[in-house]
Image: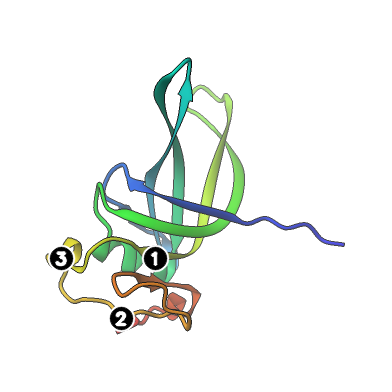
Amino acid sequence: MSGINKVILVGHLGKDPEVRHLDGGVTVASFPLATSETYNKDGKRVEQTEWHNIVLWRGLAEVASKYLQKGKLVYIEGKLRTRSFEDKEKVKKYVTEIVAENFTMLGRKSDFEQSPATPTHQSTESKIEDEFTIGPSDESGDLPF
């Protein structure tokens, strides 16, 4: 039996997506995502924030670069990946990232009005009117609208 590697996060972008174009025209975008939870400790409300490194590839990266901005609320589905590299001092470092397979922009439509166009909902199952889903079908490089 094979394993399952699935991550689902809902959080706010910590900064605008950083977009790079690799050899062969492949686009990659990355950004930090903050997820927060609150709990009571000794009768006081405590908020704990976790930061996640999000990576998007190809068409998904292109769409993210156009529509996602620092502070926006987003639902992300993806896979957990750990990679290693050597820093300038030849020390091996490890980084854990979420490789996004699709995302849904959450919030009011007015939150995205400064975008060039309003995306259409790509999911077959509409949750609420104010969600916009961008998923694997967008990897052809064509915009979904």
User: Which part of the image, by quadrant, shows the N terminus?
Assistant: bottom right
Q: Residue at x 42, y 64 (%)?
A: 103
Q: Amino acid at mark 2?
A: Thr
Q: Residue at x 48, y 19 (%)?
A: 41
Judge by depth and name the residue closer to the eye, 118 or 108.
108
Disc 3 + disc 2, Cβ < 8 Å: no
Which residue does the numbered mark 2 point to in the structure image? Answer: 120
Q: CA distance from mark 1 to mark 3?
A: 15 Å
Where does residue 113 sit, x and y in percent of width and height? 14, 67
Q: Which mark is residue 82?
A: none
Q: Is residue 102 left or right of residue 7?
A: left
Which residue does the numbered mark 1 point to in the structure image? Answer: 104
Q: Is 37 situated above or below 98?
A: above
Q: Residue at x 36, y 82 (%)?
A: 142
Q: Amino acid at mark 1?
A: Thr
Q: Which mark is residue 110?
A: 3
What kind of element bears circle 3? helix
Which residue is outermost to the right?
1
Q: CA distance from mark 2 to mark 1?
A: 11 Å
User: Which part of the image, by quadrant, shows the C terminus?
Assistant: bottom left
Image depth: mark 1 or mark 3 in front: 3
Where does residue 53 sit, x and y in percent of width and height? 45, 43
Nearest to N terminus: mark 3 or mark 2: 3
Tell me if mark 2 has few (under 14), some (14-19) or many (20+) residues whose alpha carbon lies within 10 angstroms of its own.
Answer: few
Judge by depth and name the residue closer to the eye, 12 or 108.
108
What kind of element bears circle 1? strand
Where does residue 81 sit, x and y in percent of width and height? 60, 48
Q: Amino acid at mark 3?
A: Ser
Disc 2 + disc 1, Cβ < 8 Å: no
Image depth: mark 3 or mark 2 in front: 3
Q: Is 57 situated above or below 140?
A: above
Nearest to N terminus: mark 2 or mark 1: 1
